Every structure is written in structure tokens, then in C-alpha cells.
Amino acid sequence: MDNIRFVNERTADLLREIGNIGTAHAASALSEMLRQPVSIQVPRVDLVPFDDMAELIGDPEQVVVGVYLTLSGDFTGSLFFVQTPQAAKSLIAEVLPDALATTRLSDMEISALAEMGNIMAANYLSSLMTFTGLQLSADVPMVAVDMAQAVLSVGLIRSLGVSHYALVVHTRIHHLSAIEDAHVFLLPDPGAERVLQNALGVALDS
Amino acid sequence: MYRVGMADARAVTGSDSLRTVGLGSCVGVALYDARAAVAGLAHIMLPDSRGDAGATPAKYADSGIALLLQLMQAQGAKRNQIVAKLAGGAQMFTVAGRKDYARIGPRNVEAVEAVLVSARIPVVSRAVGGHKGRTIELYAQDGSLTVRCADVQAITI
């Protein structure tokens, strides 16, 4: 079972460091976009079995805002940026003051959330590329507001069950009015897990 | 109540029920034999096993429905008494001008329908397509299937 070997302490440390640096860069980009000071902590990085991904957020039926980007380059996969609608609305309230007025998301709000997801993904990938030497790019972000299980299953289907673990970066976003939890999920496609593992191995040895 | 996970299939009888949570582009295939009071539910993820279902036959429309029929027949269901209800197959994410992978939901529904036609199992009701995730529960007592979307009252089909 290659994917079990993938879960070791040194790799986890490296992934946490990649997460820390990626989100630090994302925070400064988000501060500009949201017109307020934003800082992001990475309390934890986990490798979780696919089946437990939705549970990790809480209730798999809980409604979440999911930004979904497909990855291409040296490996393919999916990247999700997942928040509760409340957290999402609180973050964009500064630039879109009407956000908190209703529970539904307007097109403007969805577009702002897509951009947030784009910023998180781009900075996380850039950090991953710096550490591993891999070349990766993310496609256009897509947004869905729905049950966590239904949203994340899109990435599970892409990986066809061949790879069994998702990398989860737990993030805590501090901004003016609150602290909001969000999650970044990286799901390698079949074959990609090994590419990522090898690249991380190289990074660990150098 | 038994939970049916992704790429899982199960059959029950009597007062039991089967539940699967957060169907997105996956399809919940609910089969029911009223006479034998046997209900079966499969959580199908992909259209076609291409003859290689591996360790998870319930993942694919073709091998998943075949497995579900076996499980139901083992509990006393008769093939010619079974009817089907379908839910799921939504397109969760859309981007203007790009339909490729996101179309997996509708393709799953088409594949399931085709397998059921060739198995001569009539589909008596559907809650498929659209852009919303669904949680469903199938009751062995009467074959009713409840379908619930996020923030919406459940319906029974």
C-alpha cells in the first residue's frame, strides 16, 4: 500500500510548511481583495481517507460553499476551498456589504468567493511548486453551495477511487470582525499520488 | 436505518430503511420488490466498469446494479417483481462554455437507465438531474423513497 507510506511524519511536516507559506502569501493577496487586514494560520495538515473527507468538516449534509479547481501540469487532481456560508459571507462583507442581509448568495458574492478560492489555490500551488519543483496550474474556479458530501464527491469521482487519501490543510482566517475556519483539500488523480510522493521525497532529501 | 456509503450497495427487508447522504453527480438506485418486501439501494459513482469493477462493483452502473440484484435475490426478491426509483445525477459545478467533466451526473443517469432497460426493470419514479445535492432514504415496508435537498423540505417519490 503505497499510499500508507505516504503518511509519515516528515512528509506531514513538509506539507504543513508548504501550507504555512502558501497561506501566508494568500493572506496578503486576500487583504488587498477584501480591503482589510487578513492573516491565516495553519493549525493542522492531515492526510485523510476519501471516505472521511466530508465528516472532517462536520456533518456531511452540512451546507458549505465549495470552490473547485482542477489541476494540471506534472500531475492532475482537484483542489477545493471549503467554508461554511456564514464564514464566507463574513469574509466578503467588507467588499459586498449586503452579503450578510440574506442567507442566499448573489452572483456577485459567488464571483467574489470564486476569486478567494483562486487566491488560496494559486498561492498554495505556488508554495507546493517551490518546495517540490513540480509545475502545476489551476483551471477556472467553479463554485457550488450545497451539502459537503455532494460538493466534495465531484473530486472523489475524478480520482476514480484509485488514490485513497486527500491532503487537507486546515486554515483559520483572521480578519477584522472574526476568525473563520476554512479547509483546503488537495485530491491527486490516479497516478498523481506517486508523482507527488516522489517530488516530496526529493524535497525532503535536499 | 442502514447507511449506504459511496460505491456501496445493500439490501434490507421488513421495517428497515436504507439511507445515502449527499448524492451529487452520483446516482442512488433504489430497487424494490413489493411482494417480497425487499428493498435495495446502490450508490453509483460512474457509468461503466468496462469489465473491470475490481473490489468495488457498486461504484459502477453496470456492475453495481448486477450486485444489488444479487443481494436482493438472496433476501427473497424475485427479479420480475422489482421496480426502480432513481435520484441524483446532478451537475454540481458549472462554468459557462465548459461541460466536459461536470457532465458526469447526467451520464451516470443515462447509464443506469440503460442497464435497467436491459435488465427489464421498470423505472417508476425519478428525482434526477438539476444542480442540487440530494439525501435519500428507501423504506423496505412500502418502497417509498424520500428525497431531500439542502434547505428544502423532503419529498417522497
Image (cartoon, rainbow, N blue to C red):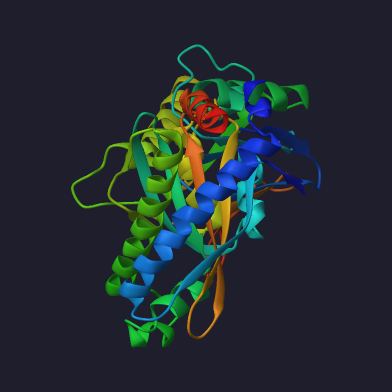
Write the residue at 61% across / 47% down. A53
Q: Determine the residue positioned at 36% across, 39% down.
A: A71
As drawn, B34 above or below A27: above
Q: Tell me what residue is drawn at x 67 percent, y 26 percent.
A: A5
In the image, A29: left or right of A89?
A: left
Q: Position of residue A160 (x, y in %)?
A: 50, 29
Instruction: Indicate the position of residue B135 as horizontal and vertical percent values.
Output: 58, 54
A133 relative position to B151: left or right: left
Q: How many marks?
A: 0
Residue at the far front in the pictured view? A206
Instruction: Name the side, left or right, on which A39 lies relative to B6.
Output: left
Residue B65 versus residue A137: which sits nearer the camera? A137
Quadrant of the image for the N terminus of chain A? top right
How far across and how far down the image is residue A126, in percent? 37, 47
**Residue lying furthest top:** B51
Instruction: Judge whether residue A132 can be spotted in this image.
Output: yes
- In this picture, is B148 found above or below B68? below
Q: Viewer-proximal residue, B157 or B135?
A: B135
In the rendered image, the residue lying farthest to the left is: B97
Q: Position of residue A51 (x, y in %)?
A: 64, 41
Residue A49 visible within the image: no
Q: Residue furthest right?
A: B14
- In the rendered view, would you say B11 is above or below A146? above
Choose between A80 and A6: the one closer to the eye: A6
- Which quarter of the picture shows residue B59? top right
